[in-house]
Image: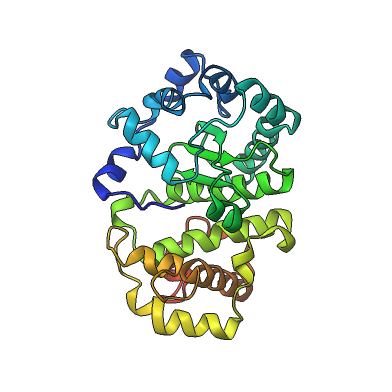
Amino acid sequence: MKNIFPQSLSSRLRPSSPPLHTIVEGGIGMPVIKTNEWLLEHYQDPLKLCKKMKPFFPRVSVNEIYDYFRLHGMYQEAVKSGATLVQTMKQNNIWGIVEREHQALQKKWKGPDVPIIILPSNTADPKLLSDTNGKAGLAFADKLFLFVPETILAHELKALFIHEYNHLCRMWLTKKEENSFTLLDSIILEGLAEHAVRERLGEAFTATWTNYYSHEKLARIWEKSILPKRMLKKSHHLHNQYLYGWNGHPKMAGYCVGYYLVETYMNTHKVCILDILGENAEVIAGLTQLKK
């Protein structure tokens, strides 16, 4: 769940979805929005497509929505007709797979019923392709966006949705405002989400970064790098450097340490994701005793 936009814009993006009854009465449908209809009409003009998102972001301009989505993995230029794109997405049952996963996980995690919007990803971005095989997601406390290639494999789509919906459920359960998020909150959020993928699909379907480092190396990164900076606010310019491993820090440092800390806690206490989905990050990190 990246967020590398100015905090002022970020605060206007979350949360702001229209009430559920408004969405349903407006014909959009719930929870997986029928974006195939939007894509048939507006795929050639991403800005017009983003205008469809305006009800979800009433305090933000269409241009700001477009810029934000582009930064987080949405396509920028149409490379085929909307009809061809939608046909391929339908053949791969993209909307149906997400709908079934949502129904299963909402029941399992007792999660909220929120709009889920699926859009094409920027498959022309070599970094997105190398890092995530061309897929990305954005989880808010009241809505979820998936940016995917139309040829995405079913297990990759499931893994992406599981990860992002886990984010959403944790934010919904903890009620913690994004502007109060710390580096510790962020790494535990990411660790929980990828363990949710492991728990549901198996370790073979987790992200490649889960195997970057040994436990010994992760313990050192945690103790020497992340732990001393754990209270950095999300708005701090160093937060993402530690989370993603920029500017000389180990690659994906925060993600990897978060996965390690969640794994340690789950193994020690013999719990599953549901048991700790709303647990305090300091408890999961072993920084305080479990509150009775």
**Residue reaching furthest left?**
8
Number of residue marks:
0
> From what the image shows, is residue 249 above or below residue 59?
below
- Is 64 left, or right, of 136 in this rendering? left
Task: Look at the picture and state if 157 lies above or below 20.
Answer: below
Q: Residue at x 29, y 32 (%)?
A: 60
Q: How is the image coloured?
A: rainbow
| Whether residue 201 is situated above or below residue 106 in the rendered picture | below
Q: Please give left or right for residue 88 compared with residue 254 in the image.
A: right
> The C terminus is located in which quarter?
bottom left
Query: Left or right: 254 with respect to 133?
Result: left
Residue 243: image x %, image y %?
43, 66
> Which image quadrant for residue 40?
top right
Q: Pinpoint residue 237: horizontal percent, then vertical percent.
A: 28, 63
Along the viewing direction, whichever of 74 and 24 lies nearer the viewer: 74
Q: Is residue 292 visible?
A: no
Residue drawn 59% across and 81% down?
Answer: 215
Give the image location of residue 57, x and y in percent.
35, 31
Residue in the image at 54% along x and 16% along y: 41
User: Could one spot residue 37 in this view of the protein?
Assistant: yes
Residue at the (66%, 60%) spot, across then down: 206
Nearest the eye: 101 or 88:
88
Residue 49 placed where, x, y %?
Answer: 46, 24
**Does 232 appear above or below 59?**
below
